[in-house]
């Protein structure tokens, strides 16, 4: 296994069934080898470290009890499935994890027959598993179906929709709750403290004391009753622990058990496999288990770039001096919020990822982490806005997909001034197709009342945020993952006039109409073409996808024969489509060549952002080639 220190037990595995043949005494060594492989690979490639380290024993035990050649194993989110990949025949390819053409960072049925369901967004496992259990029963087959879901993913309503139907149908189904008390950050909400064993223990003890005291007061048989209450501690516990919740959904509840005790896990899973109906096994794990830096900072090591494995320090090459778009968003929002007490911020379980940590620290009463509930986040924001507040909903572009109906009905139909800040818009890189934020322009631009914009650089993001908060209507701003141009930030960002773009460079030979992250590469391409080919290419930054800067575009197009439209989003229905519609409606298409660059009608795999942009012709050189072809 190149790049990974020799791992004798792991590298002897030919099939997942071999995991069962390993003597129990050697299992701790196997677990250590798995951790070593994961740490070394993620240190080089980046990835989801802490979640995967936390479920090593759970995964080994799963594969000693269940057989993925026949049984169905469904991971939730799938960011914790590295051990599963190693144990299901993928250890030789593991060093290619998240690299272009290499193993995906998430379960993918097209990658392995042992990945039974494709995943990346959270809280789908129970619903998918239930579907598989129903299909199994209709086919009269006997295999087991097992879903593994984290306590963070249990904050989404979808998980309860699955539990509800599963309990109603009473199908044989095992749900393993991987409870580490963490989402990416600490888990939030009433449910998380209900699941927390600390609270439930305290409750149980208090309840026991009170019951004993009451029973002792019953004349004659009081002492016997108190003794009975002591003996029935287990059932009391299950009454006041999460068992109560799951039993209400008609699941049999087992647990909580230690998620790092291999023998216990194996025994309990084996027992669960013999039971009928829906079963929930509550497993307590530690995020980052076995790697001190990740144990002490599980949030940082949830998803991490390259680092030195000995120390956990970020790799020198991976450190960057420029602020990311996320950081610019976070600091600018704090700036604006300091002056406007109506501004409140909402995240769906991603305060760090969306840059809201500083806001949460400075304005704790105006900050809301709602858990992994993008739909709820949007309707909650609509409620806040309806009462005069100015909610800013910061969600990754890909996760906002979940909230489409809420955006349409709860925000835009009612013209409520909610500001959507869509981070990680465009190609996100190594997380791949489940995480690319390429659909947002298309799924937002047709919604009435919504203003939609995308900045070309960091100061423009600042100005767009100021614009968004100055409007009395719904607004969305989308910006890419990573750093921008490094342009100086503004101390007092002023709004950008609505529906007005900016001609950044004149030129008579061709016109590029670009949006967001593709504007600066277009400008660079135009500069190079002037130097290398003597071509004069005009570059227009549209800034707004809606309202389109119609007058400016029509004037510019009228003066050009060759037009290239560039965006980092899907071509179907996106920005380029908007420009084409405008030109067709204005009868400006005939006699002109118009080409669009963007993301074609297929899912884009994982790789670095640069690799993917290059493959799609979205880099400076891709734009130059497209322009040369256009004018040739
Ligand atoms: C719909 C959706 N929103 C947000 C995310 C981003 N995300 C990935 S993992 C995660 C936390 C999951 O917590 P949990 O299920 O407890 O798993 P753990 O990482 O703690 O093992 C979040 C918020 C996502 N994958 N899907």
Image (cartoon, rainbow, N blue to C red):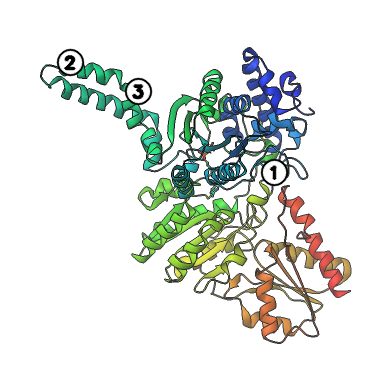
- Which corner quadrant of the image does residue 290 belong to? top right
Q: Is residue 235 above or below residue 629?
A: above
Tell which circle, 1 or 3, labels the residue nearer the N-terminal end: 1
Q: Of 615 and 499, which appears nearest the observer?
A: 615
Return the mark for residue 15. Answer: none
Cα separation, mark 3 vs mark 2, equals: 19 Å
Is 70 placed left or right of 242 in the picture?
A: right
Front: mark 2 or 1: 2
Tell which circle, 3 or 2, labels the residue nearer the N-terminal end: 2
From the image, which quarter does the N terminus lie in?
top right
- Secondary element at image label 2: helix
Return the mark for residue 223. Answer: 2
Name the spot of residue 257 as percent of width and height, x first. 46, 24
Q: What residue appears at the point 45 percent right and 64 percent down from the top-left corner? A: 418
- Secondary element at image label 3: helix
- Which corner quadrant of the image does residue 488 belong to? bottom right
Name the spot of residue 151 as percent of width and height, x first. 47, 38
Is 250 placed left or right of 559 in the picture?
A: left
Return the mark for residue 109. Answer: 1
Cα separation, mark 2 vs mark 1, equals: 60 Å
Q: Which residue in the protein does label 3 denote?
A: 234
């Amino acid at each position: 296994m190149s790049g990974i220190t020799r791992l004798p037990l792991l590298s002897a595995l030919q099939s997942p069934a071999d995991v069962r043949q390993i003597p129990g005494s050697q299992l701790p060594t196997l677990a250590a080898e798995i951790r070593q492989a994961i740490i070394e690979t993620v240190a080089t490639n980046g990835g989801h470290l802490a979640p995967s380290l936390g479920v090593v024993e759970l995964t080994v035990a799963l594969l000693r009890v269940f057989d993925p050649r026949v049984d169905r194993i469904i991971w939730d989110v799938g960011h914790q499935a590295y051990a599963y990949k190693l144990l299901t025949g993928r250890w030789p390819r593991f060093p290619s994890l998240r690299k272009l053409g290499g193993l995906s960072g998430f379960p993918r049925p097209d990658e392995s027959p042992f990945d039974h369901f494709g995943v990346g967004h959270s809280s789908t496992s129970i619903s998918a598993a239930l579907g598989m259990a129903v299909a199994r029963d209709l086919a009269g087959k006997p295999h087991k179906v097992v879903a593994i879901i984290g306590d963070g993913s249990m904050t989404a309503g979808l998980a309860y929709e699955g539990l509800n139907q599963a309990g109603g149908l009473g199908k044989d189904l095992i749900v393993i709750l991987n409870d580490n008390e963490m989402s990416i950050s600490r888990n939030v909400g009433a449910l998380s403290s209900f699941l927390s064993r600390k609270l439930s223990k305290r409750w149980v003890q208090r309840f026991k004391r009170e019951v004993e005291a009451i029973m002792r007061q019953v004349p004659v048989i009081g002492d016997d009753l108190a003794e009975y209450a002591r003996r029935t501690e287990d059932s009391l516990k299950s009454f006041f622990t999460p068992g109560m919740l799951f039993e209400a959904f008609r699941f049999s509840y087992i647990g909580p058990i230690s998620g790092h005790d291999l023998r216990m896990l194996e025994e309990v899973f084996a027992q669960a496999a013999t039971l009928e109906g829906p079963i929930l096994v509550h497993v307590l794990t530690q995020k980052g288990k076995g790697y001190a830096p990740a144990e002490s900072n599980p949030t940082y090591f949830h998803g991490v770039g390259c680092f030195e494995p000995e120390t956990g320090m970020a790799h020198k090459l991976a450190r960057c001096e420029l602020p990311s778009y996320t950081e610019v968003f976070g600091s600018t929002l704090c700036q604006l919020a300091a002056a406007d007490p109506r501004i409140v911020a909402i995240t769906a379980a991603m305060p760090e990822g969306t840059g809201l940590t500083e806001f949460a620290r400075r304005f704790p009463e105006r900050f809301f982490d709602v858990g992994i509930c993008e739909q709820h986040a949007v309707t909650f924001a609509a409620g806040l806005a309806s009462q005069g507040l100015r909610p800013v909903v910061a969600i990754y572009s890909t996760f906002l997909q979940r909230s489409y109906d809420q955006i349409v009905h709860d925000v835009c139909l009612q013209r409520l001034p909610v500001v959507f800040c869509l981070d990680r818009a465009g190609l996100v890189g190594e997380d791949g197709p489940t995480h690319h934020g390429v659909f947002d322009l298309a799924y937002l631009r047709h919604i009435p009342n919504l203003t939609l914009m995308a900045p070309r650089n960091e100061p423009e993001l600042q100005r767009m945020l100021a614009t968004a908060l100055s409007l009395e209507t719904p607004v969305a701003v989308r910006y890419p993952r990573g750093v921008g141009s490094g342009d100086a930030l503004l101390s007092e960002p002023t709004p950008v006039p609505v529906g007005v773009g900016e001609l950044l460079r004149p030129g008579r030979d061709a016109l590029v109409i670009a949006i967001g992250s593709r504007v600066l590469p277009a400008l660079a391409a135009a500069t190079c073409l002037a130097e290398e080919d003597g071509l004069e290419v005009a570059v227009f930054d549209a800034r707004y996808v809606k309202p389109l800067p119609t007058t400016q575009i029509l004037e510019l197009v009228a003066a050009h024969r060759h037009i290239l439209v560039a965006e980092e989003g899907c071509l179907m229905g996106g920005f380029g489509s908007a420009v084409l519609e405008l030109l067709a409606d204005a009868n400006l298409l005939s006699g002109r060549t118009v080409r669009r660059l963007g993301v074609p009608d297929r899912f884009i795999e994982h790789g670095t952002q640069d690799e993917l942009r290059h493959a799609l012709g979205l880099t400076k050189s891709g734009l130059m080639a497209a322009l040369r072809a256009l004018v040739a």
